[in-house]
């Protein structure tokens, strides 16, 4: 069992991640005021001291705690540390993402530093929360006027007044970009991106206010597993409590290439005599969503590598070694990071990708990840040059690529380095739909006026006989995502679409299910009976389990009529998605006979 301490944006995100597992967990807040809908999580509300927290964990068999509370909830952090050390329960600290500490702001460690920074008769807008009012009241004795910005809750107002705040001193949060009063200075907490820190700073600058920031306290649990985003949280849970998620996530080849590039750069610095540091077994990789995860790396002779892990997603690239080598080319633009493809990385031979034909098959997102992470490494280690050449290679990549979509996409000579999010969720719909989109984009770029979309290789084989002159890039598999694929056709303005479908998916599509996956749609025998009735066919289907059995029992002379009924219903649901495109529907039986729109 997992116990989450939330009540924050991070708590909400943690719940969203855990909900994906479909397993029970507990979600705890102090006040119970957070608006949050849980399907598998069970809410508990109210403050817990160390003994109460320990009793709860023991009674409910808690084996992992996720601390997603506010960075300034020091007492709760200390309580969690105490209890988890006692019970030897691992802790994941879901931390916020923090911008760099800007030198033009005034940073303090404690409220006691404020009197030296403010003059009598000055005014201060404090946005540090209702709990801090008692710590700020002494400033008023020095002649400083303090305004307190708090949440517009009855409980917050009552607590503020109990600490001596007057009505005219209170102002209320409406948004992070609102300044409620004219003040000489503003006091902020280092609350991170999700706390609206940047927005508050920018508005304060517009008002010409001095900006004083209370630094976030150090987290007290040295053994906590720190993450700062949903992907990192999921991977930490998979590591610390493997059975919670039935399927585990993996890394994209783009993340692997980035990790290898980071490690190879550190290795290169050592070889150049610019660093004496021990080469790390893990490197931090910032993902496109801004969070950072740790990725395992290794080292060879003048190269570093990362082993691709697909998790439980079926992927022929699982276990491959993604390598990076580093060199420095003098005389290049000082800001250049050149990224090249080496052995086993394919080459784009057709238009429709992020880069023109002849470029290495390394997509835009991985290239940007590599450059961004090397920029961060340069901030940490000033010896990293501005101009480097990173060469990505994949041993045996050419052979592996033959078992991917790459040959069809016009990627030759190896695999492609891809990945939009940096993480692969098992059986990820997002990843599959993105692969369809890439295929549709390539199909459009092939110059073909017609694109043929099919559910799989079997239907495609039959349909290709009808369009022998179309390039192979004009044939795209939609899997179950018929609606998504047709929407792409409309967005890409593909003039003519042929939809090839076999009966199992066709009867679902005819009923309006544009996603035909079995977890969302099954054969509705009542609806199939309606289709038969419309076709003038009497047939007992009560014992049928598969739609294709219909072909065996419908008299041959009536099959064409039945096919046209099914096609008409499919057309009714598909055509509105592509109103300005020509649509042809092929219904294909198990022997390859095609019935088409009339």
Image (cartoon, helix red, strand yellow):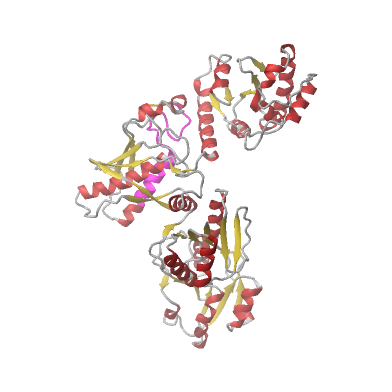
Where residue 57 sits: x, y (%)? Answer: 51, 64
Quick one: which residue is furthest to the left in this view?
Answer: 273
User: What residue range appears in magenta?
Assistant: 347-375
Where residue 177 sits: x, y (%)? Answer: 56, 64
Q: Quadrant of residue 503?
A: top right
| Front-most of residues 92 and 480 | 92
Where residue 59 sits: x, y (%)? Answer: 54, 63
355 in magenta? yes
Quick one: which residue is furthest to the top in this view?
Answer: 557
Q: Is residue 447 left or right of residue 117?
A: right
| Front-most of residues 320 and 118 | 320
Question: Could you tell me which quadrant the C terminus lies in?
Answer: top right
461 in magenta? no
Q: Is residue 258 left or right of residue 77?
A: left
Residue 153 to residue 401: above or below: below
| Front-most of residues 14 and 106 | 14
Residue 110 to residue 334: above or below: below
Q: Quadrant of residue 479?
A: top right
Q: Is residue 214 visible?
A: yes
Where residue 2 sits: x, y (%)? Answer: 52, 57
Residue at position x 72%, y 15% from top? 560
Q: Is residue 598 visible?
A: no
Quick one: which residue is furthest to the front in this view?
Answer: 59
């Amino acid at each position: 069992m997992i116990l989450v301490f939330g009540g924050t944006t991070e708590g909400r995100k943690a719940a969203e991640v855990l909900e994906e597992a479909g397993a029970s967990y507990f979600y705890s807040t102090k006040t119970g005021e957070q608006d949050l809908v849980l399907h598998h999580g069970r809410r508990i509300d109210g403050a817990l001291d160390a003994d109460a927290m320990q009793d709860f964990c023991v009674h409910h068999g808690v084996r992992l705690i996720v601390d997603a509370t506010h960075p300034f909830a020091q007492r709760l952090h200390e309580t969690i540390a105490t209890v988890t050390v006692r019970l030897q329960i691992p802790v994941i600290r879901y931390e916020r993402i923090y911008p760099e500490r800007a030198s033009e702001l005034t940073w303090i460690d404690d409220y006691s530093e404020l009197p030296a920074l403010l003059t009598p008769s000055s005014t201060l807008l404090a946005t540090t929360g209702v709990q801090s009012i008692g710590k700020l009241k002494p400033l008023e004795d020095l002649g400083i006027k303090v305004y307190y910005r708090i949440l517009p809750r009855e409980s917050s107002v009552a607590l503020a007044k109990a600490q001596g705040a007057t009505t005219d001193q209170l102002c209320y949060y409406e948004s992070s970009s609102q300044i409620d009063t004219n003040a000489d200075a503003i006091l902020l907490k280092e609350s991170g991106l999700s706390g609206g820190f940047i927005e508050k700073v920018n508005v304060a600058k517009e008002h010409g206010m001095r900006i004083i920031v209370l630094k976030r306290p150090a987290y007290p649990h040295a053994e906590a597993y720190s993450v700062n985003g949903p992907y990192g949280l999921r991977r930490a849970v998979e590591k610390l409590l493997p059975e919670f998620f039935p399927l585990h996530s993996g890394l994209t080849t783009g993340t692997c290439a980035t990790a290898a590039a980071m490690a190879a750069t550190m290795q290169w610095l050592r070889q150049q005599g610019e660093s004496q540091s021990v080469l790390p077994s893990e490197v931090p990789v910032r993902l496109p969503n801004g969070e950072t995860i740790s990725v395992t790396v290794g080292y060879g002779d003048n190269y570093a590598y990362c082993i691709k892990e697909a998790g439980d997603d079926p992927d022929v690239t699982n276990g491959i070694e993604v390598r990076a080598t580093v060199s420095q080319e003098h005389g290049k633009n000082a800001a250049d990071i050149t990224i090249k493809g080496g052995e086993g990385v394919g080459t784009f031979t057709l238009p429709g990708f992020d880069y023109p034909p002849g470029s290495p098959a390394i997509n835009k997102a991985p290239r940007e990840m590599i450059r961004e992470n090397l920029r961060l490494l340069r901030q940490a280690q000033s010896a990293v040059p501005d101009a480097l050449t990173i060469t990505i290679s994949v041993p045996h990549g050419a052979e592996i690529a033959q078992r991917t979509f790459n040959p069809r996409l016009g990627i030759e000579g190896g695999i492609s380095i891809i990945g939009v999010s940096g993480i692969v969720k098992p059986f990820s719909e997002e990843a599959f739909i993105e692969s369809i989109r890439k295929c549709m984009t390539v199909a459009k770029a092939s110059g073909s006026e017609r694109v043929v979309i099919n559910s799989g290789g079997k239907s495609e084989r039959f349909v290709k006989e009808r369009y022998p002159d179309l390039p192979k890039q004009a044939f795209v598999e939609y899997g179950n995502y018929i609606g998504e694929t047709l929407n792409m056709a409309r967005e890409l303005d593909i003039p003519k679409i042929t939809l090839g479908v076999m009966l199992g998916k066709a009867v679902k599509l005819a009923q309006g299910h544009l996603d035909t996956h079995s977890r969302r749609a099954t054969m509705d025998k009542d609806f199939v009976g309606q289709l038969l009735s419309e076709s003038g066919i009497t047939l007992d289907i009560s014992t049928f389990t598969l739609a294709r059995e219909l072909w065996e029992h419908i008299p041959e002379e009536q099959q064409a009529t039945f096919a046209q009924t099914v096609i008409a219903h499919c057309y009714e649901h598909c055509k509105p998605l592509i109103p300005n495109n020509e649509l042809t529907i092929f219904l294909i039986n198990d022997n390859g006979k095609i019935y088409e729109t009339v």
